[in-house]
Image: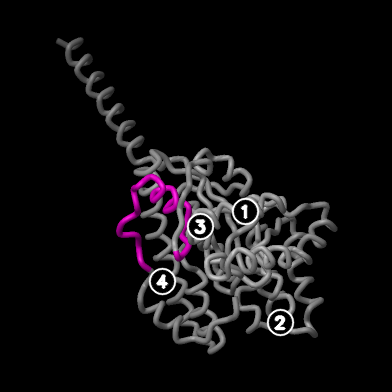
Amino acid sequence: MKFFLEFVSATCALLLAATGLASGAADAQPERAIAITIDDLPAGAANFMTAAEITSMTTKLLATLKENKVPAVGFVNERKLFFRWNEVNERIAALNMWLDAGFELGNHTYAHTSLNRAGLKEFEESVIQGETVTRLLQAQHKMTMRYFRHPYLDTGRDLQTRREAEAFLVSRGYRIAPVTMDAWDWMFARVYDDARKRGDVAAQTEVVKSYLNYTTLVFDYYEKFSRDLLGYEPKQILLLHGNNLEAEHIGELFDLLRKRGYRFVTLQDALSDQAYSLPDTFVAEEGSNWLDHWAISLGKPPLHSPEAPQAMIDRANAIPQPQP
């Protein structure tokens, strides 16, 4: 009888342990990786900022990236170096800070030129004009220009134009830097800057909370969408922008990502994921992220993606917009 009771007790213990392991496996997050990319350098609102303000913003942003050991690639609009002729050298120096800190720069066209709106010829001219200073700076650091990011993610309104633009970029030595995650930080940043200039700390806090909440919704949606579409979560590529919101709060974004199980990888590492070799025939009037590209190419368009808070959109639209 004693043996029987010991047997039952041991069996129950094994079943409970197995149940716990299964539960733990079900609750475990998938292995996640993400590359950080930052557009519109030297600053998204460069025409509203002094060189000293751009330098201050850059210093904060780079310090947090280095402190968190997060690799990143910054994408440059060189026109922003020349908004104020008496500050050109200082603005170039702020851009060079990225390279001095060990980060890489890519081309985002000279004037944030949309392929869809400008057409192929003007787009190609803006690509060439947009690499002049950056190539020189990178050569001084024994680096080359490797990556290109489409402004507005506009990759072409028709497939012929898209393929011709892609061939042109390859001929210039570029690899296109896709995006899979985008939480519209540029829009929140406009409202944040307005509150910051007015010294409204409560409004700044509200914007940060709203931005991080919306970012959470975006990640919830596209993580699930990735699994449904691809059967797994690829190495994601996050689109951010050079602005005061990120300079002062990107650390909180990194905390959010770590809690979701992400490790930070280089853009080169992310692009090694097989997903970035999927067929992509996406064309549209407006750009979109590459998860949407693949889904539409496969005839499985995304549905009910999260929308940014309308109150923030309205507040952003009421504020004068910086030149792109």
Question: Callout 3 environment at 10 Å: few (<14), some (14 to 19), or many (20+)?
Answer: few
**Residue that numbered label 3 is attached to:** 255
Q: Position of residue 30 (x, y in %)?
A: 42, 41
Q: Which residue is mark 2?
A: 83
> To which quarter of the image does residue 24 belong?
top left
SS at circle 1: loop
Q: Earlier in the sequence, mark 2 or mark 4?
A: 2
Q: Nearer the viewer, mark 2 or mark 4?
A: 2
Q: Earlier in the sequence, mark 3 or mark 1?
A: 1
Amino acid at dot 4: Ser
User: Which of label 3 and label 2 is nearer to you?
Assistant: 2
Q: Closer to the camera, 308 or 68? A: 308
Amino acid type shown at disc 1 = Val
Q: Cα distance, mark 1 to mark 4?
A: 24 Å
Q: Compare residues 91 and 129 and report the one nearer the observer.
A: 129
Question: The residue under label 3 is which amino acid type?
Answer: Asp
Task: Nearest to the eye among marks 3 and 1: give it.
Answer: 1
Q: CA distance from mark 3 to mark 1?
A: 12 Å
Which residue does the numbered mark 4 point to in the structure image? 210
The secondary structure type at the circle numbered 4 is helix
Q: From which residue to which does the magenta span run?
A: 285-307
Tell me the amino acid under the disc marked 2.
Phe
Q: Position of residue 63 (x, y in %)?
A: 67, 63
- Residue 6 in the figure: left or right of residue 255: left
According to the image, label 1 marks what residue? 70
Q: Residues within 10 Å of mark 2 (few under 14, many from 20)?
A: some
Whether residue 25 appears in this view of the structure is yes
- Position of residue 235 in the picture relative to residue 54 (left or right): left
Q: Earlier in the sequence, mark 1 or mark 4?
A: 1
